Image (spheres, rainbow, N blue to C red):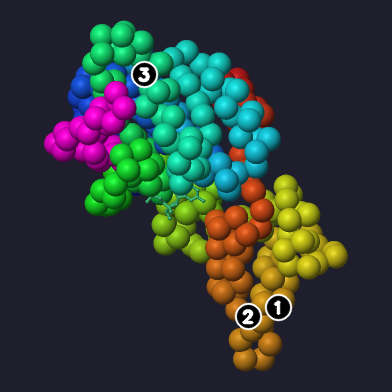
Amino acid sequence: MSQINWFPGHMHKARKEIAEVMSEIDLVIEVLDARLPRSSENPLVNQLRKGKPVLKILNKQDLADPQITEEWLAHFNSQEGVRAIALDASQQKLVKRLPEICKQMIPTRAKAERPVRAMIMGIPNVGKSTLLNAILGRKLAKVGNEPAVTRQQKRYTVQGGLALSDTPGILWPKIEDPDSGYRLAASGAIKDTAIEHELVATFAARFMLDHYADNLRARYRLTDLPEIADDLLDVIGRKRGCLRPGGVVDRHKASEILINEMRAGTLGRISFETLTEWQQKDEAARLA
Ligand code: GDP
C-alpha cells in the first residue's frame, strides 16, 4: 500500500505544489482525525511549512476517547509553531472561534489589519469540507478525493479576518506501518477495497478486545468475550442473525456490522492510537 501512495513521480509533484501553496499562505490549518492523529498526518506538511505556523485540528473529537485526545493535544501544543485544538466540525460554537485563533497565531498581519491567509489541508475523509463549510457558513461543492494540493484554484474567501482558500488541499496518508493502514481503513479514511474488508474487521476485533472490551460487552450484550478476534466476529454474526444456510455465520456481514458501528461511534468513543505507543515506536526506530 505504501508504495502506491509514495511513488516518486507523484511525490515530486505534490512536494512542488505544497511548497508553492506554502509561499502564498501565512498559516496551515491541518485537519486530522482525532481517533488517529498520527496515522492521519502527512509529514510533508511539517517538512515544507518552513517555519509557518500550523493549526492542527483534531476533528471528530466526538468519536474519539477524550483522555487520549487530551494527551495528543498536549504533545502537539508543545511543538514549535504548532497549535492544536480538538473539534467536532458540526459544533458551531467552536468553529466560529477559528478565525480569532488564526489571527492570534499571526499577530503581525492581524495588527496591520490584513487578513490571515490560510488553507485547510488533510487526508480524505477527516472532515475538511465539513469544516470549511461550517467556517464559511455555506455549502461549497465537495471536491474529489484524489490526492492533490489544488493550487490552481486560488479563490480565497475572507471571513472575520481570515482569508481561507475555498478548496482544501487533499493530502494522502503516509502509511508508516501495517497498523496505520488498518487504522485508516477502520476509521473510513481509506477505502475498504484498499484492504480486504474482513482483514480490517479482524484487526478491529483484536483492537476492541485488547482496548475496549467493556464497550463490546455492553453493545453486544456479552458476559464472556472470546479470546480470538475471528471468534468475536462469529459471536457478533450470531447475535445479529447474519447466518448463511446451514447456520454458518456470514463473516462479511458480521465484519460490516463491527466496522460500521465502530465508525459511527455506536461502540462508544474510541481512539485507535495513543501518544505513548507512538513515542515507543519512534524510539525503537531511532535505535534501529
Ligand atoms: P473531507 O474528505 O476531509 O472533506 O471530509 P468530509 O467533510 O467530507 O467528511 C467526511 C465524513 O465525516 C462525512 O460523513 C462527515 O459528515 C463526517 N464528519 C466530518 N466532521 C465530523 C465530526 O467532527 N464528527 C463526526 N462524527 N463526523 C464528522
248 to the left or right of 34: right
Which amino acid is tagged 1? Answer: Arg
Q: Which residues are magenta?
A: 148-170
Which residue is disc 1 drawn over?
238
At horizontal 60% and vertical 23% (from top left) the residue drawn is 74
96 to the left or right of 11: right
Which amino acid is tagged 2? Answer: Cys
Pick whichever, 246 or 188, lies toward us: 188
Assign a secondary structure to mark 1.
helix
Which residue is disc 3 drawn over?
103
Q: Which numbered marker is on residue 242? A: 2
At horizontal 56% and vertical 41% (from top left) the residue drawn is 61
Q: Residues within 10 Å of mark 1 (few under 14, many from 20)?
A: some
- Residue that lies at the very extreme toward the bottom in this rendered image: 245
Residue 206 percent across, percent down from the top left:
68, 55
- Alpha carbon of mark 1 to alpha carbon of mark 2: how far? 6 Å
